[in-house]
Amino acid sequence: MADTSKFTISNYVVAYIDILGQQEALKKFPLVLNYDTDLNSLSQAMQETYVKIQEIRNYIKTFFEDKSKQKVGSAIYDRLSDKKRKDVERFEGEPIEFQHHGDYVVIYNKLNNYLGEPCVKPIWMMIGAIAGLLLDEFSKHTPIRGSIEIGVAADWDNFGIYGSAFFNAYKLERYVADYPRIVLGDEIFKYLSFWANNPKEDNVTKWNKELATRCLSIICKDRDDKLFLDFLSEKMSAFFGNVYDFSAPHICERVLRGSEFAKQQYEHFKGKDQKLERKYKLLYDYYNNWQPSY
């Protein structure tokens, strides 16, 4: 029987990130290692599999660590007294956790602090991290597909997260995301909408309301009516508190490289693989629709 003292059940936000194309990359590995196998010849395969997955994990981990050390440039927060700031800081959320196996990475965070009080900042941080991840990885020719959802789960010692939060995020990635994009579930949309429209005037509600409003500003309906993360939105700068310049040359360069990647993949599969041709056409269309805003 499991020791129930080793875990607690809570609401979690979960992101399920799948690095696509790993099966093809794994074909570069030999079936078995022979005594005369040149391990140096496996370096490219390692770069495309293990190293790539670790880079993605480390990118998100670094983002969370950096953001946990600073406050969003919020006019509300800046006007608070030291005493009230400490009150708001209770709603920072718990540390990020990871779970990964093979070609997927799961990122999860409790939706409450150590006192059990609800907070929106973990969602804001997760959405921001993944938006930046898409911008970077598409520009590096790494196709990513995933989902973000909230739900009930338990975080087990030496096992990781398990529960409806995990399973629902998995189902969204597997059956709904379809092409390289990040889709969001109904529950996370309801949760953010609740806070964005909360009429209360206490400082903590105002703080959660501001972050929820920012999150909703870059969540849009795609052509199939599925909610997805609009990581090329012109509202991305405001999402980060206007501390990033999304018209900067280095950002534009990444957008252009990502667009070129989508175009190359679309042209590569055109007439050869209908399924992949359609998926990369959708990604290419997304870049074409939003690129002029940069």
Image (cartoon, rainbow, N blue to C red):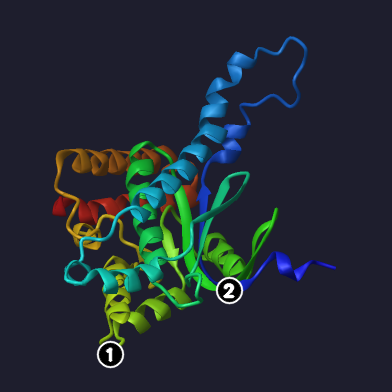
Residue ID at (48%, 61%) = 147
Residue highlighted by disc 2: 10
Residue 173 horizontal/vertical position (percent) = 52, 60
Query: Considering depth in this image, is 220 or 153 the residue closer to the camera?
Result: 153
Residue 261 screen position, x and y as percent: 34, 39
Going by the image, does 23 lie left or right of 274?
right
Label 2 residue SS? strand
What's the distance in space between the residues labelled 1 and 2, CA to CA? 25 Å
The crowding category of the residue bearing disc 2, from other C-alpha atoms within 10 Å (few below 14, some 14 to 19, many at least 20), is some
Kindly identify the amino acid type of the residue bearing the numbered disc 2: Ser
Question: Residue visible at 42% across and 64% down?
Answer: 122
Quarter-wise, where is residue 39 in the image? top right
| Image position of 103 with respect to 95: above or below | above
Amino acid type indicated by mark 1: Pro
**Can residue 273 be seen by looking at this rendering?**
yes
Which numbered marker is on residue 199?
Answer: 1
* 122 versus 9 height, above or below: above
Q: Residue at x 28, y 38 (%)?
A: 257
Name the foreground residue: 286 vs 199. Answer: 199
Asked whether, in this view, residue 60 is left or right of residue 36, the answer is left
